[in-house]
Amino acid sequence: MTASATLDTLTDRQAGHLRHFANLSRQPPNDWSMMQGRGTGQDDFGGYRFQLSYMAYAMALAHRHRLPAAPGVFKPVFERLMEKMLLPEVWMYWARVSQGGSVFNMHLSDRLREEWDPVGRDNIMYSAYVQSMALLYNYLFEDDRYAAPGALTFKYWSFFWGGKERRFEYDQNSLNETVYWQMVESGYLGVACEPNCVFQICNQPAILGFRMHDLVNGRSVAAEVTDAYQKAWSQFGRLGANGHYNMMMAQDTHAVRDNAGPAPWADAWCGTLMNMWNRDFVRSHYPAQIRDWLVEGRDGALSVRSADRPLIMGQKVINDDSDFGWAATWASEMGDHATLAGLELHADRYM
């Protein structure tokens, strides 16, 4: 949001983004036009799951804060985004990723196996978004369609391979319970994304889901989880020695990987989402963190200094880090109008 925008209006540009989301939601199943990322196999931050869920979050914010009297504008779009979120192309990566083999879990490969249920174990980088989207929909529109048994069903069958249909039936409540108990079993440090990889960032959407579940059902799970999460991470520190958010923890050794780059996306993404429940902490560290990777340009424009990617196993990693986009999102979330204006000026000029 720019400094000139107010909370009771939509600018033409904001309305245009919402229309773009609506247009994407209307594309036929498996038509991913204008949504392809740099990476392959849905492995990176350009994956469909992230695009779909953050479109849904943006629609929710616009409805709640800008057009609260227009549920009919937002509700059908939200439903279509959820339909796409359940498509196999969005979650089938898990059958590969669940087997391990990365630098973070290669030593566990003999214990890991191919898994097709995309929400049954780990994979919080997908399950939390389905959970939070379903419960957010229920809260916003007072429609509990995703609470019906089997309303969130993940299914896949091919005529060419694999035998009988793979089918995993959940609803918003059973999925919420599944995510919750994985959180408890982790000691509230968080649920893994890839096997053995617990990212602070990826557990924040689950907390949003718990909060929506509490609002719908009159419970206090989110308060329990955030309190226990704070205590669990206090042993290790949410920030590294350089003042940036620790990126991840190895589940088996509890070894913490800091944001050594520093990688802008790690700070900005974590700060944006954690602000919903840990506002004072996030805001107290924001000025120093963002200062480390802003680059001043002409006439007040600002860009973001992305960290160089090291070779991994002799390979160059090609993916979408989304440094610039997350920096702009975080500046907006923090109400930092000057930084946001500088980033928008750079985007208008060069992107």
Image: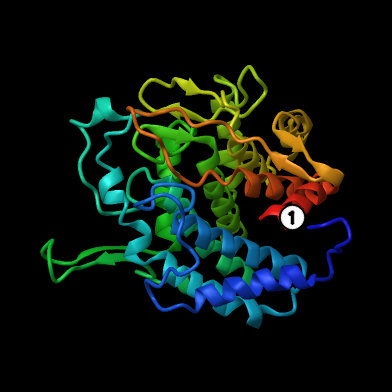
Q: Is residue 20 above or below residue 117?
A: below
* Among the 4 quarters of the image, the one containing residue 151: bottom left
* Among the 4 quarters of the image, the one containing residue 258: top right
Residue 251 image offset from top left, x and y in percent: 39, 28
Residue 101 image offset from top left, x and y in percent: 27, 34
Residue 215 image offset from top left, x and y in percent: 62, 59
Looking at the rendering, in which quadrant would you find the C terminus? bottom right
Question: In the displayed image of the protein, which residue is found farthest to the top?
Answer: 241
Residue found 43% across the figure and 72% down from its top: 83
Q: Is residue 49 visible?
A: yes
Looking at the rendering, in which quadrant would you find the N terminus? bottom right
Residue found 28% across the figure and 43% down from its top: 98
Residue found 77% across the figure and 73% down from its top: 12
Residue 169 image offset from top left, x and y in percent: 31, 64
Kind of residue at disc 1: Arg
Q: Is residue 205 above or below residue 278?
A: below
Is disc 1 placed on a helix, strand or loop? helix
Q: Is residue 143 visible?
A: no
Look at mark 1 in the image and give the residue it sits on.
349
Horizontal side, residue 111 vs residue 229: left or right: left
